[in-house]
Image (cartoon, helix red, strand yellow):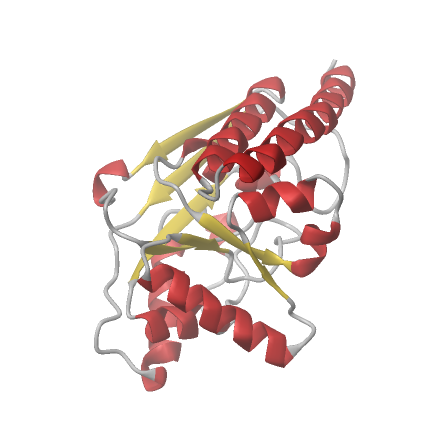
Amino acid sequence: MKILRSLFAYLVFFISTVLLGTLAALASLVSRSPRWAHLLARQWANINLWVAGVRVDVTGFENLNSRQAYIFLSNHQSGFDILALLGKLPIQFAWLAKEELFRIPILGHAMRAAGYIPIDRGDRRKAVESLIYTASRVQSGTSVMIFPEGTRSPDGVLQEFKKGAFLLAIKSQQYIVPVAISGSHRVLSKRGTWVLEPGIIDVTIEKPLSTVGLTVKDNDALMQTVRETIRRHLTPEEGGPQP
C-alpha cells in the first residue's frame, strides 16, 4: 500500500510541478510582484503534503509580525521540509537556493517568478555577491528562508551550520527567526528507500533574535545560539551529540 501511495504521490508531484510551475511563470508576465507565484507555490506544497499523507503541526505563529522582514533559519532533514515550510508558514518569503535548481525547466522559471534568490556555492565571489544582494532584499522588506546546514542531513541528525547565513543577518541587521523541523526525515530520508512514510512533521517557530549592533566578531556566537535554539525542539536522536 505504501509503495502504491508513494508512486501516486510522485506522479502528482510531477504533474503539479509542471502545471503550477507554468502558471507561476505566466503570472510573472502579468505582474512583477512575486505574490501570485508564492500563492501558487503554497498550493503546490499543500497538495503534495496531502497526497503523501503528511500532516504539519506548527507552533509559534504568535512570534511573527506580518509587517516585519525576517531571516528564517531552519534545520534541514528532508525534501519535505520545503513543502512543510512553504505550505504552512503564514508569511511570504523568498528562498535562498542553490543555483542548479534555477536551471531546471519550468521549476527554475517558477522560482524566479516567486522572487527566489540563486546562490552559487562553488564560486566564492558569486556567493558573496548573492549574500550582498540578499541583504539588500531583506533591508527592503523581503523575508528569506535559508537552511544554514547547507544541505539535507543524511540521517536526520542536526549538522554543523555554515557561516554565510549569519554574516548575511549581521550585514542586514535584521531579525533572525530560528525554525526547528522535527520528524520530516522519517517521511523521506536522504539515505535509504524512496518509499514515503505518512506521518507528522512538527515545525516550531522561535522568537526573533535581533542582530542590531552585532558585528562580524559576533558571528560564531550568534551561530551557536541559533543552533542550540533549534536543537531544543528536536528529539534527542535528531539533536545529536552536544558540541
The image position of residue 160, as x and y in percent, is 53, 67
* Residue 225 lies in quadrant: bottom left
Left or right, residue 219 beside residue 18: left
Q: Residue at x 66, y 36 (%)?
A: 188
* 157 vs 211, nearest the viewer: 211
Left or right, residue 28 beside residue 59: right
Q: Which residue is drawn at 73% across and 47% down?
A: 191
Q: Which residue is drawn at 46% across and 73% down?
A: 132
Evaluate whether residue 234 shows in this view. no
On screen, 208 above or below 111? below
* Residue 195 lies in quadrant: top right
**Residue extending furthest top?**
1
**Residue extending furthest front?**
30
* 185 vs 142, nearest the viewer: 142
The image position of residue 111, as x and y in percent, is 59, 45
**Residue extending furthest bottom?**
217
Q: In which quarter of the image is the N terminus?
A: top right
Q: In which quarter of the image is the C terminus?
A: bottom left
Left or right, residue 66 beside residue 58: left
